[in-house]
Amino acid sequence: MANQIKISPSILSADFSCLGNEIEAIDNAGADYIHVDVMDGHYVPNLTIGPEVIKDIRKSTNKTFDVHLMIEPVNPLLESFAKAGSDIITFHPEAESNPKKTMGIIKKLGCKTGISLNPSTPIEVLDGLFDEVDLILVMTVVPGFGGQSFMEDQLPKIENIRKMIDLTGRQIDLEVDGGINFETASKAISAGANVLVAGTATFKGGPSQYEKNIKTLRGV
């Protein structure tokens, strides 16, 4: 199972003074996806990056850009994020009145679709979406606040969603984001996750440590 686990380092933990070099380093170190957290200061309290930055860092790697939109509204900005080089676009169903419509827009733009569930979001929001979703992201912290601990009470949710995915027979990524480190990674994997978002744990120790950090998170 370990070699099937994908690691998606969150670039929020990278050194932004040399972001392109950091992305090249995690690419060379074995990252599977590049996780880009987009926060608007509205849906969540923090403010991060927009399409222009994604467009610039797209030059640094061919790896999958796993773009997590913590913004509201979502639909008006989808085209700009797709054109900037996003491969997977994940949004929160609370941020749009018709999640299925939003997913349809993402598909038409040529990207894979992702749905993100906050700790308080029930799994019922996934009803009717399994035919079109490519990635389900379970947040194991409250989005928008840094330095939080992994919420173990989300493990049953991960387990239940894994069962639901398996019943579809489709290849849907089950991603976990929030407080993922060398201790909690194995818990998320055991619960059924196959993609781990890790910021601090990936970038800890500088570029010479990235390959070791990614392998440790993957359980190799």
Image (cartoon, grey):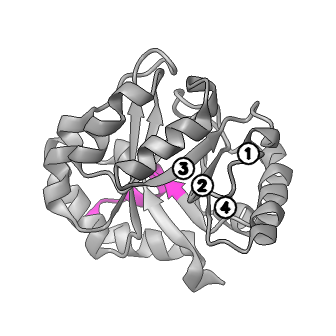
Q: Nearer the viewer, mark 2 or mark 4?
A: 2
The residue that mark 2 highlights is 133
The residue that mark 4 highlights is 183
Tell me which label, 3 or 1, sits earlier in the chain. 3
Asked whether the beta carbons under mark 2 and mark 1 sit within 8 Å of each other, the answer is yes
Is 203 one of the magenta-colored residues? yes
Which secondary structure lies at badge 3?
A: strand
Q: In the figure, residue 219 lies in which quadrant?
A: bottom right
Residue type indicated by callout 1: Leu
Residue 114 bears which disc, if any? 3
The residues bearing labels 3 and 2 have C-alpha atoms spaced at a distance of 6 Å
Is 211 one of the magenta-colored residues? no
The residue that mark 1 highlights is 126
As drawn, 81 above or below 164: above
Residue type indicated by callout 4: Glu
Q: Quadrant of the image for the N terminus? A: bottom right
Q: Nearer the viewer, residue 38 or 216?
A: 38
Q: Is residue 7 left or right of residue 190?
A: left
